[in-house]
Amino acid sequence: MYKEFFGLEDTPFTLTPDPRFIVFTPSYNEVLASLYYGLENAKGLIVLTGEVGTGKTTALRWILRRLDSSVLAAYVFNPRLSIDEFYHHVTQMLGIKDWDNKSELLSEMGRVLEDRHRRGLRTVLIIDEAHELSDYVLEEIRLLMNFESDNAKHLQIVLTGQPELRDKLNQPNLRQLKQRVALRCKMHSLPNVEEVERYITERLLIAGSEQPNVLTPGAIDFVFQCSEGIPRQINNICDNAMLSAYAAGDQIVGRQVIEEVADNLDMLPEQQEIVANAPEAEDVGTSRVLTPEAREELWNNQARTPAAKPKKAFKTETKEPSPKPSGTSRRIPFDDLDDEINLEIEEVGGFY
């Protein structure tokens, strides 16, 4: 809807795992390099975990699109399958059709995998959302790892899932499968506002933007806070923010728009104090307001800091300046500062 308004050729912030929009941030590069290493060196069983929305499926699809023609890959995206359904799904993808029972299936699968390995061909089984797999199917996956020769695995398996997958693999009844895991990778959220800015800017460039600075620095900083660096949440916020800006006729998305969108999506950060209509905060790139605890700490630090020498206007002619208090300084409440400043000066005999 807003593509023409912002001069875009495509929608940059969709929620679908489109590998065209993959952004090679340092943290993402590390995961892709690990996956490539594991597949290239035939490590056998690889486990990739990450929080919801961090881009695991996008990474898998990017790899699938770039596999060599010598690699045959089976991709399972719905893990809620019985054992029979699981084998039926896998054999269809591997082109194995002539089998009537599990014994025939395993025999034919072993023959196909051995033949492909002998010809220098790779076979990869990728299972997404693997934390949803039943223990029975996971045990069958362990048995599939037995298709091997003396020095090589005939089948590469990649299990991808949420952090619950690690907990599942730590179950005592799955300890044999856990020991088969040759490589573990973890997909992290974007760790700082710099990577979030790069992520947003590059997606806009991929979408055809000639001026990718659509979001102000203050807006990007607040996107980072609300999304916690999770790419799917960044996409959701930015897509809705650009739609709101389009409806208002604004070609620049400011912090206030992000605040409104995040509020509508129930994604405002907890204990975040938002100052409405405060453009000066965005101009200097600030985005946080001091908490009461921070104000208390700031006051205590100021109270311990030596003050400046007194001005002549506050000196008295008949009374020597009183000595500097050795105890704790009297606290001046922030709200009553203007009313009590003159009284305090009289009581302490001037500034020190």
Image (spheres, helix red, strand yellow):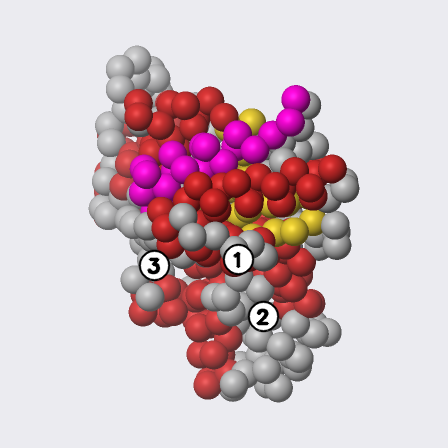
Residue drawn at the location 52% of the way across and 40% of the way down: 107
Residue matched to label 2: 12
Q: CA distance from mark 1 to mark 2?
A: 41 Å
Label count reads 3
Question: From the viewer's perspective, is 322 left or right of 144?
Answer: left
Mark 1 Cα within 10 Å, few/some/many (few <14, many 20+)?
few
Viewer-side residue, 79 vs 249: 79
Residue drawn at the location 59% of the way across and 85% of the way down: 5
Viewer-side residue, 276 vs 267: 267
Residue matched to label 1: 97
Label pair 2/3, CB-CB below 8 angstroms = no
Quadrant including the C terminus: top left
Q: Which residues are magenta?
A: 132-150
Tell me which amino acid carries mark 3. Met
Tell me which amino acid carries mark 1. Lys
Q: Is residue 146 magenta?
A: yes
